[in-house]
Image (cartoon, rainbow, N blue to C red):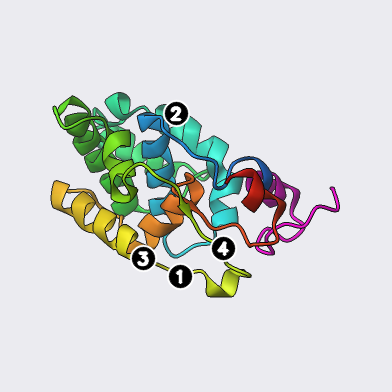
Amino acid sequence: MSDKIRCSWPGDDPLYVAYHDEEWGVPVYDSQQLFEKLILDGFQAGLSWITILRKKDSFLKAFDNFDPEKISRYDKDDIERLMKDKGIIRNRLKILSTIKNAHIYLIMETEKAGSFSDFIWSFTDGKILQNNWPNIDQVPAATAESEAMSNALKKKGFKFCGPTICYAFMQAVGIANDHDSKCFRQAELR
């Protein structure tokens, strides 16, 4: 592990440090990758992110690499298969919401208004929110943008997308650069 100054939240867990250094806050524009990350953030509700990270490979396998087309066709047998899969979070409501969200995602991808990515990035007019928090204690749990995103997603029928989940999602996919002001990634992602 390097002696770079980074945000405090990953601690010294190698998986968490790698996620912080290589993935968190990197802008994502691919619609299916955004769908995957939103779903994983929904599964994280009430849990720590490291729990999801440790199960990510199992999630990818269990949910067909988060292919919305495949997920939208899941039936009772698939739901029961997922409920028995010890490699993922076995929460029936979250599993059912993933299937429903896949249906809505597919509808959104065919709308003339643009892609799912266009929709997600529209809450900041396609720009990255460049924040400069001295430490994690000053980062808000939600913002006006995450409130707007949450409301719009819910209006379309999405589940597990409250303002706090949406803000964590915005941070993860680089819509909001919330690396601490002294973190080496803050400057790299500007």
Q: Report if the CB atoms under discs 4 and 2 are less than 8 Å apart.
A: no
Which comes before the other along the chain, label 4 or label 1?
4
Amino acid type of the residue tagged 3 in the rendering: Thr
C-alpha span from label 3 to label 4: 15 Å
Picture quadrant where residue 138 is located: bottom right
Which comes before the other along the chain, label 1 or label 2?
2
Q: How many neighbours does mark 3 have within 10 angstroms: few (below 14), some (14-19), or many (20 or more)? A: some
C-alpha span from label 4 to label 2: 34 Å
Magenta stretch, main secondary structure, is loop
Which comes before the other along the chain, label 3 or label 2?
2
Q: Which mark is residue 143?
A: 3
Residue at the spot 43% in from the left edge and 33% down from the top edge: 33
| Residue located beneath label 2 in the image | 65
Q: Decide whether residue 101 is among the magenta residues.
A: no
Q: How many neighbours does mark 4 have within 10 angstroms: few (below 14), some (14-19), or many (20 or more)? A: some
Q: Which mark is residue 132?
A: 4
Residue at the spot 44% in from the left edge and 65% down from the top edge: 46
As helix, strand or loop, the secondary structure at mark 2 comes to: helix
C-alpha span from label 1 to label 3: 7 Å
Residue 86 located left or right of residue 124: right
Mark 3 or 4: in front is: 4
Q: Which mark is residue 140?
A: 1
The x and y percentages for residue 113 are: 16, 32
Which comes before the other along the chain, label 3 or label 4?
4
Nearest to the observer: residue 130 or residue 53: 130
Q: Decide whether residue 9 is among the magenta residues.
A: yes
Amino acid type of the residue tagged 4 in the rendering: Asn
